[in-house]
Image: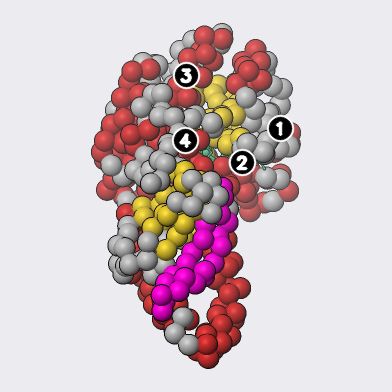
Amino acid sequence: MANLESNVEQSPTGIGHLLNSHVGAIRFMAGTRIFRQGELGDVAYMIETGYVEISSMSGGKKHVMAILRTGEIFGEMAILDGQPRSATASAMHETTLIPISGKQLRDELDRGSAVTRLILIAAIDRLRTIQTKDYQDVESLKDCKKQQTQNDTHIKLARVHASQQFKLRFDMERAICQRHFKFDYQPIVSLADGRTKGFEALLRWPRPDGQILMPGDFISLAEQSGLIVPLGAWALENALQSLAVITHNSRQQECEGGGIFMSVNISARQLEREEDVEQLATMIEKAAFAPGCVSLEITEQTLLVNPRAATIGLARLKATGASIVLDDFGTGYSSLNNLHCFPLDTLKIDRSFVNRIVDDRSRQRVVAAIIGLARELNMDVVAEGVEKLDDARWLREHACRYAQGHLIAKPAPLGEVLGYLERDIEF
Ligand code: C2E
Ligand code: CA
Ligand code: CA
């Protein structure tokens, strides 16, 4: 019998219920059978620690087909083609496995293209044929082996990539439950007086080996897997707590007309389901900051993925008093339609336009036009990625209201950025 053991604590504040797959690894003692040839199965596994023997019976004899180790996946074929298990899997030593449910795997596939699915099913079909032949006669075994070696490298690479992604995703679920993510905050200053008016909360993922993963390494996986929903909810919760600390430390008390605001990034998937939007809205309402103190940053992509959900979701969030910022402006479609169809308060000009703006006349024209457009539409403008003093001065002279970038401060933990509230930056 397998010794089932969950390695994961449940979330202390209840975001764990949003995770839609198993978060517990399963431990098998040495010699335990994980599944048997001929059984139906709807779970695949990834080996977290230990070794697994894959074997099959033919002609009354046991054939060991493979010894799998950490990072390898098995049991996926039965899920994908619905056929009985073609082999028996047993733990060789004490082994910990991460279960991948059939639903989870099929959800992943559904998000992939139809061609990917077709290729995968065809590949599995071929693999099963090879396996069946494998133990029938020695000659066909040789042919199959030749064919197999050619495919081996591709399959190995694909397996390595897939298993890394599964492992990362599993670790991410665990890290969300155990609250192992951290946030850095980056000041956003008023160009007119050099005062810090707000902060952007940016996620960081410290790993057990001491490495810190940056959002570029995990946000797309979080979005693909849907984990961005609990992760983003937690990001907002955390940012609201930090805003309470910041407001307490600030000499500027009210938000509208020049107080401190907190910006949080929101992904398209967080706006897809009404209950997820409601959860965010409730958090903002409960925190009860003055209107405009909470800013939600979305990209144009978010508006395009599901415009209907974005319209309804943003309207609900806007009703909480939060302001809505269009992030990375200039890099997407920069559709004028979006500017009046959605309840936007601020345009955030992407750093690719801001970087060395003083040296580039065409960038200057684009940025001046964006600032003019924002003014006409009664929207604020933030320039992000400001690294040089002369760029900041150019932006100030062209009536850009806010700046954010390494010139002012790099993102840093809350305790380190609080000091910016007391310091006026000179441009
Ligand atoms: P973003 O929203 O455009 O965030 C700004 C990024 O620019 C941050 O990178 C920041 O560190 C970087 N940056 C700021 N000033 C400068 C500068 O002067 N020069 C340069 N070269 N870079 C600067 P980071 O922290 O790696 O975040 C990357 C992206 O990850 C963010 O881009 C945002 O799209 C996403 N992200 C971060 N936190 C969250 C989150 O909580 N939820 C979601 N959905 N996305 C997040
Ligand atoms: Ca942002
Ligand atoms: Ca941005």
The local secondary structure at tag 1 comes to loop
Earlier-in-chain disc, 2 versus 1: 2
Whether residue 41 is visible to the viewer of this picture, yes or no, is yes
Q: In the rendering, at what x and y percent does residue 182 appear?
A: 56, 30
Circle 3: residue type: Gln
Q: In the rendering, at what x and y percent does residue 116 appear?
A: 42, 70
**Colour scheme shown:** secondary structure
| Quadrant of the snapshot with the C terminus | top right
Q: Which of marks 2 and 3 is in front?
A: 2
Instruction: Name the residue beneath numbered marker 1.
Output: 407
- The foreground one among 252 and 358 is 252
Q: Distance between the residues labelled 4 and 2?
A: 23 Å
**How many residues crowd mark 4 within 10 Å: few (<14), some (14–19), many (20+)?**
few
Whether tag 3 and tag 4 are in contact, CB under 8 A, the answer is: no
Whether disc 3's CB lies below 8 Å from ligand 1 is answered no
Q: How far apart are marks 2 and 1 (CA)?
A: 23 Å
Q: Which of marks 3 and 4 is in front?
A: 4
Earlier-in-chain disc, 1 versus 3: 3
Question: Quick one: which residue is furthest to the bottom in this view?
Answer: 139
Instruction: Name the residue beneath numbered marker 4.
Output: 7
Query: Which region of the structure is painted magenta?
Result: 48-69
